[in-house]
Each structure stands twice: as structure tokens, then as C-alpha cells.
Amino acid sequence: MFRLDYLSCVLTVVSTILIGRRNWEGWVLASINSAVFCIIGVRTAQLGFIPANLFCIVLNGINLRAWLKADASSKPVSHQS
């Protein structure tokens, strides 16, 4: 049987490494991990996981948007003549 706890462990480690390296994909993996946590919460009747991880998904989206916006504004503008 597929173990969601192991999947969550791998997603946590990989997303943390990617975010630390300033890769936006880390935020996507962190959001997927939060969704996995919600599934674990439903399956184990630990319903407190659900609102906390839904909040994390929203926060990850806000952070990703801020990162992408900051990266876009910090890139030099090329002038074509």
C-alpha cells in the first residue's frame, strides 16, 4: 500500500531544499505536501491538519507570487533598438 507519510517526508525535504536555493518549484511542492497532509488528516481523523494546511497552501501561493514578482522586477530590462 502507498504510504502518504513517506511521500510527505520526501516532499518536505525536497521542497525545503528547493526553497532554500530560491527555486520557485519548492513552493509548488510545499503546497502539494500541504494537500497530502490534508488527506492524511482525513484518513486518520486528525481534522486539525486540514485548516492549518489549507492556510499553508494559501500562504505558499502568496509567497510564490511575491517571489516571482520580485524576480521579474530585479531582472535588467533589455532595450531593443
Image: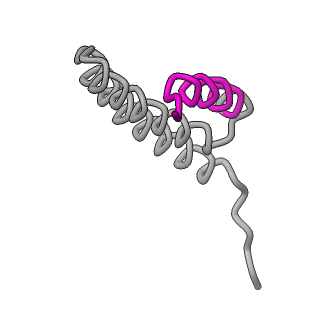
Residue drawn at (24%, 17%), measured in percent from left and top? Answer: 45
Image colouring: one colour
Percent position (x, y) of residue 65? Answer: 46, 45
As drawn, which residue projects farthest toward the front? 1
Position of 20 compared to 31: left or right?
Answer: right
Q: Quadrant of residue 7?
A: top right
Position of 30 compared to 59: left or right?
Answer: right
Could you tell me how many numbered marks the image carries?
Answer: 0
Residue drawn at (74%, 69%), measured in percent from left and top? Answer: 78
The front one of 44 and 31 is: 44
Position of 17 compared to 27: left or right?
Answer: right
**Is most of the magenta stretch helix, strand or loop?**
helix
> Which quadrant: the C terminus?
bottom right
Q: Quadrant of residue 44?
A: top left
Percent position (x, y) of residue 24? Answer: 61, 43
The front one of 7 and 1 is: 1
Percent position (x, y) of residue 74? Answer: 66, 47
Residue drawn at (69%, 35%), measured in percent from left and top? Answer: 22
Position of 45 compared to 8: left or right?
Answer: left
Per the rendered image, the range of residues in magenta is 1-18
In the displayed structure, 6 sits above or below 69; it is above
Does the magenta segment cover residue 57? Answer: no
As drawn, which residue projects farthest toward the bottom? 81
Percent position (x, y) of residue 36? Answer: 42, 32
